[in-house]
Image (cartoon, grey):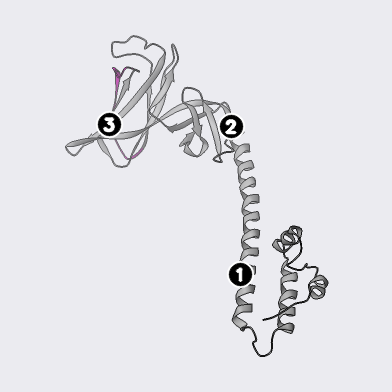
Amino acid sequence: MTTISNDVLTSLGLKSQTNTAATAKSRDTLSQSQFLKLMTVQLANQDPFKPMENGDFLGQMAQFSTVSGIEQLSTSFAALSQSVNQGQAMQAAALVGKQVLAPGTKAQLDAGQGMKGAIGLTAPADRVTVGVYDANGQLMQTLDLGAQGSGMTDFSWDGLTADGKPAPEGVYEFRATASGGGGSQPVETFLGGQVQSVTADYTNGGLILNVLGLGAVKFGDVARIG
């Protein structure tokens, strides 16, 4: 078994394994240069009748290099993440006061106002309708968009019910349906609103937009600006 004296360890800037807990902490922060010096001393002081295999030394070197590389990579990713978040914050700050379109089915209607949105089709449809429902699930208005091709299609509701009366203030739900080929299926809806403020989400990362009528919207969920 290879034995290394305390004098040799001290010359390398290391302590004996029998020292205090502070020494253990020092070993946890062993630098690569100290590690290589220690390996050299191990080679010089090994038992010539029971030498260590070369593979053992190579394995130790590879393991040390891997750990060191992972630490450096983690530091680089942390710096990159911070830079990306700062860039997003600057972009999102410029969105305050702008109109955005985000996935959603419910939005707040103010008195005397209308609402705008869009539907997303993955394939053409013979007919697309958007039903507007109040908080009790009662159908208030039906918007007939006719035949539409694939992609985004805008729609608007003037805030009037089917009998032409202004709808009261409150939260309304939009349900879009596309029909064609002898069947019908629900369609994803997007609703629009004005960005009031921007908040950094330090827990999950990213940014949160406070959109008038829609509430909190993730910056990454915004489908269209303006």
Labels 3 and 2: the sequence-earlier one: 3
Give the residue at the far left of this rendering.
182
Instruction: Residue 226: tell me if it is visible.
Output: no
Residue stretch in magenta: 136-151
Considering the whole magenta stretch, tell me its main secondary structure. Answer: strand
Neighbour class for label 2 at 10 Å: few (<14), some, many (≥20)?
Answer: some
Write down the residue under mark 2. 199
Give the Cα separation between the discs numbered 3 and 2.
Answer: 34 Å
Relative to 66, residue 135 above or below: above
In the rendered image, the vertical position of residue 84 relative to residue 143, given as above or below: below
| Residue 137 position by quadrant | top left
Q: Dot 1 surroundings within 10 Å: few (below 14), some, or many (20 or more)? A: few
Question: Which secondary structure lies at badge 1?
Answer: helix
Q: In this view, does 78 lie above or below 67?
A: above
Three-letter amino acid code of the residue under disc 2:
Thr
Residue hosting label 3: 177
Question: Reading the chain from its start, which is encountered first: label 2 or label 1?
Answer: 1
User: Within the magenta stretch, is there residue 82?
Assistant: no
